[in-house]
Image (cartoon, grey):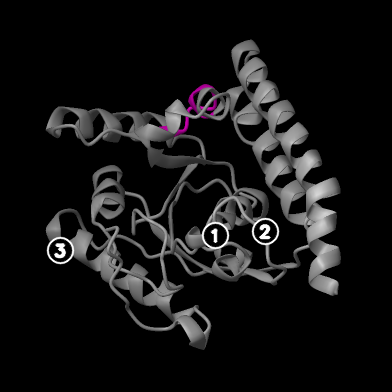
Amino acid sequence: MVKLIYRIYQLFIALPLIAIYTVITCLMVIIGCALGNGHFWGYYPGKWWAQFIVRVLLLPVKVEGRENLQKGQSYVFVANHQGAFDIFLIYGFLCRNFKWMMKRQLRQIPLVGKACESAHHIFVDKRGPSKIRETYDRAHKTLQGGMSLVVFPEGARTFTGHMGVFKRGAFMLADDIELPVVPITINGSFNVMPRMRDMRWVTWHPLRLTIHKPIMPIGKGPDNIKHLESKSYDAVMSGLTKEYQGFVENPDQ
C-alpha cells in the first residue's frame, strides 16, 4: 500500500515538478552563463535542481567527511557509479563548486547538453591522442581558484551494486595537473534506481555520501598515477555497505 501511494505521488506530483524544474534550470544556466559569472550560474542552479529532485522524492541524505576538505583547494573527486542518482547526490550535497567530466555523447541531450556546455563542464573526447590532450588542457584551465572536478573512473554504472575496475584517465589527469584526489563513496543510489530500471519507478531508500581524506601526490609520473588509483579504489571500496563490498566485473567497461 505504501509503495502504491509513493508511485502515485511520483506520477502526479514529483515527476511533473521535476520536469518543469529541469527546463527552468537549463534555461537559467544557459542564460546566466551567457550574461557572465559562470562560476555562479554554472554551479548553483544545478545544485539547487539536484537538491530539489532528492527532496521532492522524499529521499533522506546523509553526508560524511566534509571536514576532510580544505577551503579554496582544488581537488579531483573520484566516485563509484551506482546509478542515476549519483548525479543528484554529488551535485546537490558535495557542497563544492566543481565541473563534471562527462562523455561527449551527453552533449547531444536536448537542452541539458547545451546547459552543460554553457556551464563549462568538460566533455571527454577519446578520438585520438590530440583530442585527449585537448581534454586535459581544458581541465587544466578550468581547475583554477578552488574549482574542482568530479569523475566516475569506472566509466559506466554498475549492474550489481559492486564496483568494477577504475580506469586510469582521472588519475593521469590529477598527475598531469598535480592535484590531490578525493575518493567518494556513494551508497543507496543502486537501490533507488539501478541502471536496469532507468526511467522507471523510484524506490525509496536512504542515500549516503562519504567524502574520504584527500590522497596527496607522491611525485609525478607512473608511480604517482598507480598510487592515486590504488589508494582511491581501496578508500571508495571501504565505504561501501557490506552488501556491495568486493569487486564484480562490469561487462560495460
Residue at image point 50% right, 28% down: 113
3 vs 1, front mark: 1
Q: Is residue 89 visible?
A: yes
Residue for point 42% across, 59% down: 157
The question of residue 120 being in magenta is answered with: yes
Look at the numbered discs 2 and 1 and tell me whether their residues touch, using CB distance below 8 Å. yes
Picture coordinates of residue 45, whole percent (x, y): 70, 34
Tag 1: Cα neighbours inside 10 Å, few (<14), some, or many (≥20)? few
- Toward the top, the furthest residue is 35
Residue 187 visible (yes or no): no
Question: Which residue type does callout 3 highlight?
Answer: Asp
Q: Which one is earlier in the sequence, the residue at label 2 or at label 3?
A: 2
- Segment colored magenta: 116-122
Residue 218 found in image quarter: bottom left
Say which quadrant the C terminus sits in.
Answer: bottom left
Amino acid, disc 1: Arg
User: Residue 86, percent across and down?
Assistant: 55, 57
Residue located beneath label 1 in the image: 197
In the displayed structure, does residue 173 sit left or right of residue 214?
A: left
Position of residue 156 relative to residue 113, above or below, is: below
Which residue type does callout 2 highlight? Answer: Trp
Q: Nearer the viewer, residue 72 or 187?
A: 187
> Disc 2 to disc 1, how far (Cα)?
8 Å
Q: Is residue 207 magenta?
A: no
Using a 10 Å C-alpha cutoff, classify the residue at mark 2 as few (fewer than 14 neighbours), some (14 to 19) or many (20 or more).
few
Residue at numbered disc 2? 201
Task: Say which of marks 2 and 3 sits in front.
Answer: 2
